[in-house]
Image: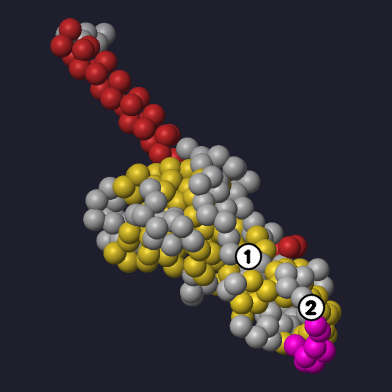
Amino acid sequence: MRIQSPLSRRLARALTRTTALVVLAATVVACGGGDDDPSPAAALVGPAGATVDGPNGARLVVPANALAQPTSISIAMSDAGAPALPSGHVVLGSTFALTPHGTAFAQPATVSVPFDPALLPAGETPVLMKTNATQTGWDPVVGTTVSGSTLQAPIGSFSWVVVALPPVLPTIRTQPLPQAVVAPAAATFAVFATGPTSSGILFFQWRQSAAGWRVTMCALRGRPIWSTTTTDGDSC
């Protein structure tokens, strides 16, 4: 028969509560994320580094010594508050918010972002777009690699990321014939153009303004290309 003193019983109860809290904390840190799970994932990452599995297969690998102090990191499948992508970009998957925004790494972390390969035309290469330091625009991330339906890239700070297809840059083989219009009427042209992976009829439209000529519509086989302002109207 084992007899516990009141002090021993109180100590045992305290240890039990402490163990329960530790288990609960570990559960919260590991909660969320994983393949096909849209819920956000959060983890406390310190100088030792860690791997954080986010929603729908997103992943972040933080190397050792990338962070000077423990930081609560979150990966969420969300574009709330993100700026609009540049014109002509085609989104190939969900936008992910890596927070806290602005978190900087002493050594690049590696982010893996899923996308839908069915949306990628044959022969074309997707890019990872990441919001800039002020979260007001987007920049392509260099050093990306594609593996199946996932794109991996090194990042030096946190912001929104999304896999996208940049605009097609076609080559106009034959210049359109001159056309006379009276401002502010628009002149619309159609020429045959070839792109990196596709060819077809390129439609574009000039409209004169005080700043010069603006190409107000430009599309190749129905897909937006880009818009620009020129002084002579020679380019789309």
- Which one is nearer the viewer's eye here, 137 or 128? 137
Q: Does the magenta run of residues contain 174? A: yes
- Measuring from the top left, give residue 21's x and y in whole percent: 33, 26
Secondary structure beneath dot 1 equals: loop
- Work out which residue is located at the far bottom of the displayed protein and give it: 174
- Measuring from the top left, give residue 59's x and y in whole percent: 50, 55
Q: Residue at coordinates 15% horizontally, 11% vertically from top-left?
A: 7
Q: Which mark is residue 153?
A: none
Does residue 109 appear to the left or right of 202 in the view shown? left
The residue where tag 1 is placed is 87
Indicate how the structure is coloured in the image.
secondary structure
The residue where tag 2 is placed is 181
- Measuring from the top left, give residue 4's x and y in whole percent: 20, 10
**Label 2: how many residues lie within 10 Å, few (<14), some (14-19) or many (20+)?**
few
What amino acid is at disc 1?
Ser
Q: In which quarter of the image is the C terminus?
A: bottom right
Q: Residue at coordinates 63% horizontally, 46% vertically from top-left?
A: 36
Q: Which of marks 2 and 1 is nearer the N terminus?
A: 1
Secondary structure beneath dot 2 equals: loop
Q: Is 225 above or below relative to 55?
A: below
Q: Is 179 above or below relative to 1?
A: below
Q: What are the residue bounds of the magenta stretch?
A: 172-180
